């Protein structure tokens, strides 16, 4: 298969309606779209990514009126959240419609739905007129993609097309909120924080049930990891540069460590927003540069910083550390 680079929404929509796979930009990261009603299309999607079949997918819709394409009902608390933050980087988990094929939800009776903020993505969904399941457009376990070039790097020859329209500006995957129970439960952090949710639905809480993670992607398997080790540090004083003697080291963060001239690849970010936007692409660029390991200064704080720290921790294998593995 030859992966086409296309810039016409109508062409992308036609490929999706025919059961093909199309990568497209949302405001968060690039998604890999497939018809959520088609078991064959979803099987191709899982194969293209090398994604475990027990990892559910998020269904993307063009507007609130389309929710019936994916969900049996829209509870009042879910409607409040969607009206407050959609179009935008929030996913609500709802009771699944029978129209959605079981492999989309990993056999669960619930489905995550999202209305992306990116205008081109919403227009694609509107023109396609079908529910589109779209995980991140990358090989499973790798950092998500925020440029079409990175999508091509991972998925060339595995998918039908990449829609090369404007790149994401948030840079991290959506917040996921389970609305199938009596109160909203935050499953995955994102740009929409728990404080944001509680301003709309005061009963919203952070989920403390490990089993609840089954309803959200990005929580149960290795994610966001380049091919070399990631070392996560909270403070620059935590790092002893002698550990890196004789090795090629990449570094990213909002501060520059002393002896930064000894690093072979450096990126400094001037805000949490730019850090979130550029983090995944930095991991990929450092990987391409052939470094031995990547040193990452952790993001600290609430909201977007907390979501970025979650992704950094997962890139480092689930725990912060100051020593090479």
Image: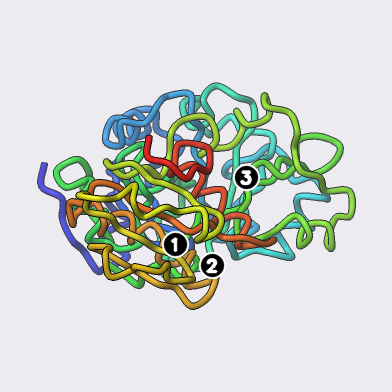
User: Residue 206's mark?
Assistant: none
Q: Earlier in the sequence, mark 2 or mark 1?
A: 1
User: Residue 117's mark?
Assistant: 2
- Using residue 283 as the reference point, say whether residue 222 is left or right of it: right
In terms of secondary structure, where does tag 1 sit? loop
**Picture layout, residue 55 above or below residue 276:** above
Q: Specify the farthest residue to the left.
A: 2
The CA distance from mark 1 to mark 3 is 18 Å
- Using residue 10 as the reference point, say whether residue 127 is left or right of it: right
Residue indicated by mark 3:
188
Closer-to-camera residue (42/97): 42
Which residue is at 81% across, 34% downward?
A: 181
Q: Position of residue 300 (x, y in %)?
A: 62, 60
Closer-to-camera residue (165/177): 177
Mark nearer the viewer, 1 or 3: 3
Q: Residues within 10 Å of mark 2 (few under 14, many from 20)?
A: some
Tally of numbered tags? 3
Q: Position of residue 288 (x, y in %)?
A: 19, 54
**Picture layout, residue 94 above or below residue 66:** above
Residue indicated by mark 1:
26
Q: Specify the farthest residue to the right.
A: 202
Q: Position of residue 106 (x, y in %)?
A: 51, 25
Which residue is at 40% across, 48% downward?
A: 136
The CA distance from mark 2 to mark 1 is 7 Å
In terms of secondary structure, where does tag 2 sit? loop
The CA distance from mark 2 to mark 3 is 18 Å
- Using residue 193 as the reference point, say whether residue 236 is left or right of it: left
């Amino acid at each position: 298969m030859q992966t086409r680079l296309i810039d016409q929404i109508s062409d992308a929509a036609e490929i999706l309606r025919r059961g093909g796979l199309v990568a497209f930009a949302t405001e968060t990261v690039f998604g890999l779209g497939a018809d959520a009603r088609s078991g064959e299309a979803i099987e191709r999607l899982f194969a293209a990514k090398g994604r475990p079949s027990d990892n559910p997918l998020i269904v993307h819709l063009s507007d609130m009126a389309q929710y019936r394409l994916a969900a049996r009902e829209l509870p009042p608390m879910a409607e409040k959240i969607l009206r407050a933050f959609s179009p935008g980087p929030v996913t609500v988990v709802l009771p699944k419609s029978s129209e959605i094929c079981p492999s989309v939800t990993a056999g669960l009776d619930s489905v995550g739905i999202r209305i992306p903020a990116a205008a081109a993505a919403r227009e694609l969904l509107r023109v396609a007129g079908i529910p589109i399941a779209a995980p991140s457009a990358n090989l499973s376990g790798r950092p998500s993609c925020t440029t079409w070039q990175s999508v091509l790097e991972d998925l060339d020859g595995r998918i039908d097309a990449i829609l090369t329209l404007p790149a994401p500006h948030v840079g991290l995957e959506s917040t996921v909120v389970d609305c199938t129970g009596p109160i909203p439960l935050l499953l995955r952090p994102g740009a929409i924080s728990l404080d944001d949710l509680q301003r709309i639905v005061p009963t919203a809480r952070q989920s403390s049930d490990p089993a609840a993670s089954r309803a959200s992607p990005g929580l149960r398997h290795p994610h966001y990891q380049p091919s070399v080790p990631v070392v996560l540090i909270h403070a620059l004083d935590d790092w002893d540069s002698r550990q890196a003697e004789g090795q090629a080291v990449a570094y990213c963060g909002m501060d520059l460590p002393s002896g930064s001239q000894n690093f072979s690849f450096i990126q400094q970010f001037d805000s949490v927003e730019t850090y979130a936007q550029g983090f995944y692409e930095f991991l990929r660029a450092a990987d391409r540069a052939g470094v031995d390991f990547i040193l990452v200064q952790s993001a600290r704080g609430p909201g977007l910083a907390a979501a970025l720290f979650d992704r950094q921790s997962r890139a480092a294998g689930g725990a912060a550390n100051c020593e090479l593995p």
